[in-house]
Image: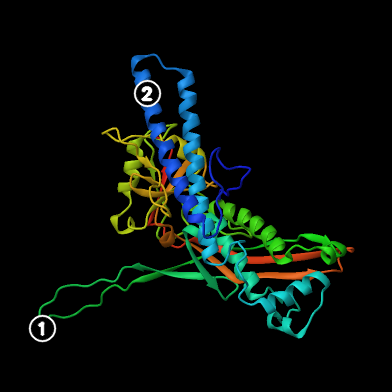
């Protein structure tokens, strides 16, 4: 997920803060985005007019691409600002929100610094000799994972109490028939079931610091360690949820697409593909075909996902009346749209290339489930690598497609 800082913000933008003034900053970003998109449309139309006259200007083409990149940066800044505000509202941000269980968190910080184990910490003890993370600290990591990991914000996230999970599916087949009042009733067919298991794995991080640094540091150790873990976990999860092979990790959604490694895995079949309309490009008609190939029962919460480079190409597409299919966000808190449907930038989806799956469209919550087992665990290890203290952090997670029908994939093909 794109984050925003003073060092990487588009030129001329105001700094976005997850505090009381953040809403006005988001409004300023939206206004800047709308102006940039208007400039893009004017410049792109001028470029198209030159092409029609046979006098295409390379400098103008570069100008169009530059403005398109600026539109993309502004839209990413708006999205980042909105997620930062959402994080602050749910207590997952770093804006100075008070801890819900300050006494417990203080005891945990003392344990991190010096390994002082006191009775208060028994609230998190388990029979294996480890320490479950404190409630507030664990929830903070989970909230931030939800923000940073694209699939967690898109799909269904379900806690799981077992070592694995198998889901049953009704394959239908129950029969019936019409009969007269006194006619004999013969036996009818009975429905059948099929099962599906999901890929599971354990993700870990093992940062280390010397005891002296821990003793002398004045930083918030919980925030420091949680920040390290959340970024690493989100990076690893993001890749697995989209392309994971199921070996010690979740099954990625892209592997269930027709032609993918798990195309035959689900009892309901594979995620269907729709061609883009060109062997190497995405055409406007391909986007329309993709939308209308999805059954109307699943379009209420459907949205597009694609990477930044693909979104830049789609931003130039028009319908038959000359209207751009992509539109920026005009309302604070609302995403940009493509042909009227929300669009989310996801780095883990492939670029536009021959036979590649360049975009997904559908209802992710009805398609993919992330399974969380136990939560985040932290074990403090002062013995293995003296003089360093290692903080062994683990999370068991699974994932896979639970229903391929609410999803379609855009394949680059004629």
Please state which of the two labelled residues, at mark 2 or mark 1, is closer to the viewer: 2
Residue 10 in the image: state x and y as whole percent: 55, 39
Q: Which residue is mark 1?
A: 182
Which residue is painted at 47% across and 58% down in the image? 154
Closest to the observer: 236 or 324? Answer: 324
Would you say 373 lies left or right of 24 here?
A: right
Residue 60 in the image: state x and y as whole percent: 45, 22
Q: Residue furthest bottom?
A: 119
In the image, residue 378 sits, relative to residue 411, either above or below, namely below
Which image quarter: residue 279? Answer: top left
Mark sitting earlier along the chain (2/1): 2
Would you say 65 lies left or right of 392 here?
A: left
Residue 110 in the image: state x and y as whole percent: 78, 74
Determine crowd level at label 1: few under 14, some 14-19, many 20+ residues with C-alpha closer than 10 A.
Answer: few
Which residue is painted at 68% across and 66% down in the image? 394
Closest to the observer: 47 or 219? Answer: 219
User: Is label 2 in contact with label 1 (beta carbons under 8 Å)?
Assistant: no
Dot label at residue 46: 2
SS for callout 2: helix
Q: Quadrant of the C terminus?
A: top left
Would you say 376 lies left or right of 287 here?
A: right
Dot label at residue 196: none
Q: Is residue 355 visible?
A: no
Residue 267 in the image: state x and y as whole percent: 42, 61
Which image quarter: residue 318? Answer: top left
In the image, residue 1 sits, relative to residue 176, either above or below, namely above
Would you say 303 lies left or right of 181 here?
A: right
Determine crowd level at label 2: few under 14, some 14-19, many 20+ residues with C-alpha closer than 10 A.
Answer: some
Q: Residue furthest left?
A: 181
């Amino acid at each position: 997920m794109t984050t925003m800082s003073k060092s990487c913000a588009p030129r001329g933008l105001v700094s976005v803060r997850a505090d009381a003034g953040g809403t006005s900053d988001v409004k300023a970003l939206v206004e800047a985005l709308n102006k940039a998109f208007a400039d893009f449309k004017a410049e792109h139309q001028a470029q198209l007019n030159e092409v029609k006259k046979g006098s295409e200007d390379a400098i103008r083409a570069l100008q169009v691409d530059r403005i398109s990149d600026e539109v993309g940066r502004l839209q990413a800044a708006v999205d980042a600002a909105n997620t930062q505000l959402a994080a602050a509202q749910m207590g997952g941000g770093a804006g100075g929100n008070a801890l819900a269980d300050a006494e417990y968190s203080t005891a945990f910080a003392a344990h991190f610094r010096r390994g002082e184990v006191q009775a208060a910490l028994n609230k998190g003890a388990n029979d294996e000799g480890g320490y479950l993370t404190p409630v507030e600290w664990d929830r903070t990591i989970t909230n931030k994972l939800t923000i940073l990991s694209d699939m967690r914000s898109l799909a269904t996230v379900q806690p799981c109490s077992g070592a694995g999970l198998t889901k049953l599916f009704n394959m239908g087949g129950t029969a019936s028939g019409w009969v007269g009042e006194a006619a004999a009733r013969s036996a009818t067919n009975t429905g059948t079931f099929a099962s599906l298991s999901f890929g599971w794995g354990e993700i870990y991080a093992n940062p280390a610091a010397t005891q002296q640094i821990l003793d002398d540091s004045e930083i918030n150790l919980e925030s420091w360690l949680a920040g390290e873990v959340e970024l690493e976990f989100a990076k690893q999860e993001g890749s697995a949820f989209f392309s994971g092979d199921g070996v010690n990790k979740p099954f990625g959604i892209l592997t269930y697409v027709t032609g993918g490694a798990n195309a035959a895995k689900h009892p309901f079949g594979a995620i269907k593909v729709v061609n883009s309309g060109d062997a190497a490009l995405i055409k406007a008609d391909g986007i329309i075909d993709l939308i209308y190939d999805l059954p109307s029962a699943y379009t209420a919460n459907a949205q597009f996902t694609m990477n930044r480079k693909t979104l830049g190409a789609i931003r130039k597409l028009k319908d038959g009346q000359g209207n751009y299919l992509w539109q920026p966000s005009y309302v604070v808190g609302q995403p940009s749209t493509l042909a009227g449907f929300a669009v989310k930038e996801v780095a883990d989806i492939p670029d536009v290339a021959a036979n590649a799956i360049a975009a997904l469209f559908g209802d992710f919550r009805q398609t993919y489930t992330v399974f969380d087992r136990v939560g985040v665990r932290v074990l403090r290890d002062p013995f293995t690598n003296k003089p360093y203290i290692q903080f062994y952090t683990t999370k068991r997670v699974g994932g896979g497609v639970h229903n391929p029908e609410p999803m379609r994939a855009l394949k680059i093909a004629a």
